[in-house]
Amino acid sequence: MPPAVQSMSPLAPIGVSAALETANDQSVKPKPKIFDEFALIDRVGIVSGGNRGLGLEMALALCEAGARAIYCFDLPATPSEEWQKTQNYIRKMDNGSRLEYVSVDVTKQEDVWKQAKDIGDKEGRMDICVAAAGILKTHTDCLTYPAEQFKAVLDVNTNGVLYTAQAAGQQMRRYGKGGSIILIASMSGSITNRDHAWVSYNTSKSAVLQMARSMACELGTENIRVNSLSPGHIYTSMTAAYLDTQPHLLEKWSNLNPMGRIGRPDELRGVVTWLASDASSFCTGSDILVSGGHHAW
């Protein structure tokens, strides 16, 4: 293998290399390794915005993939009923995975850092970060957009994402095992949603895209990968505020992509598990669009 290939898969030999290495040994009975590449056995992670919605959906997926513990960061002092039922569901799976809840304001940098350090102290590692906390404010004309409202959106959607990524990344560096940081952006970071005056939201998500690229370039040699994930129109508790009060929007949004429908939260499970796992070991600084092909049109 050329010198420029500086690392080996932790599952090596793998793929065609494994086939060639064992070609002359008839006693070897090959076992599929592709599922092992996606497994998250014994890994520890943080999911901000994990009390409900997309954050909770992704946290559950990571637990199903075998993570030792996933800590959900969110603002409420106590977790939602939805979260508690999900935690109980994971317990009944009996795969050794734990879903934990931490009440913290992601806009408070030092508080977020401290919570992550406490997790590192307890678990002895940090492998995964999904920065999913975000807010969306009501339609406001860009020329009269209130400063305080603009700041509030960026404080959560941009600053909060940075602080969460920093907190997890510090622990990844501390333990020297690398890791995967996944910043939840939006297709709204690279396009503008027609007829929606969301200048603060769009701006905040565009910043997250560049944040992922910038952090990826700084942390790559430490084997800390940073990518962004950009969902399209998904029915969540956040978008429900629009879809449930304006029924015509469902048809409108559905017709904006080639698949003719909006997405489900569970349709992010596979991609977030891939990004968190060794299966995406050479993927960093990328934005993964899950939008039903919205950009294709």
Image (spheres, rainbow, N blue to C red):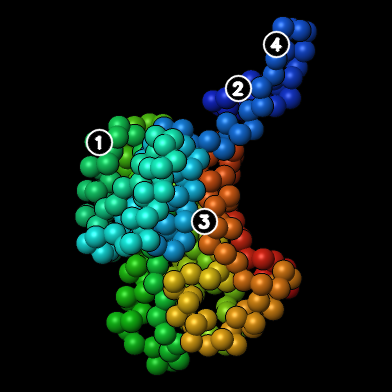
Q: Say which residue label 4 marks.
A: 28
| Residue type highlighted by circle 2 | Ala
Residue labelled with disc 3: 228
Mark 1, Cα crowd under 10 Å, few <14 / some 14-19 / many 20+, is few
Of mark 4 and mark 3, the one earlier in the sequence is: 4
Q: Which of label 4 and label 3 is nearer to you?
A: 4
Which picture quadrant has residue 105? Answer: bottom left
Question: Of callouts 4 and 1, which one flags the residue occurring earlier in the amino acid sequence?
Answer: 4
Q: Residue at x 66, y 27 (%)?
A: 32
Residue 134: percent from left, percent from top: 40, 67
2 vs 4, front mark: 4
| Location of residue 151 (image quadrant) | bottom left
Judge depth for marks 4 and 1 and give the one in front: 4
Residue at image position (46%, 33%) is 41
The answer to the question of whether label 4 and label 3 lie on touching residues, with beta carbons closer than 8 A, is: no
Amino acid found under the numbered disc labelled 1: Lys
Provide residue 110's location: percent of width, then percent of height. 22, 54
Q: In this rendering, would 190 be left or right of 167?
A: right
Comes first in the chain, label 3 or label 1: 1
Q: Is residue 284 visible?
A: no
- Can you see residue 9? yes
Quarter of the rendering containing residue 56: bottom left
Q: Pick whichever, 66 or 152, lies toward us.
A: 66
State which tag comes first along the sequence, 2 or 4: 2
The local secondary structure at tag 4 comes to loop
**Which amino acid type is marked by label 4?**
Val
Instruction: Determine whether, in the image, residue 227 is placed left or right of residue 80.
Output: right
Cα–Cα span, label 2 and label 1: 30 Å
**Placement of the N terminus among the 4 image quadrants:** top right
Residue position marked by numbered label 2 in the rendering: 12
* Image disc number at residue 122: 1
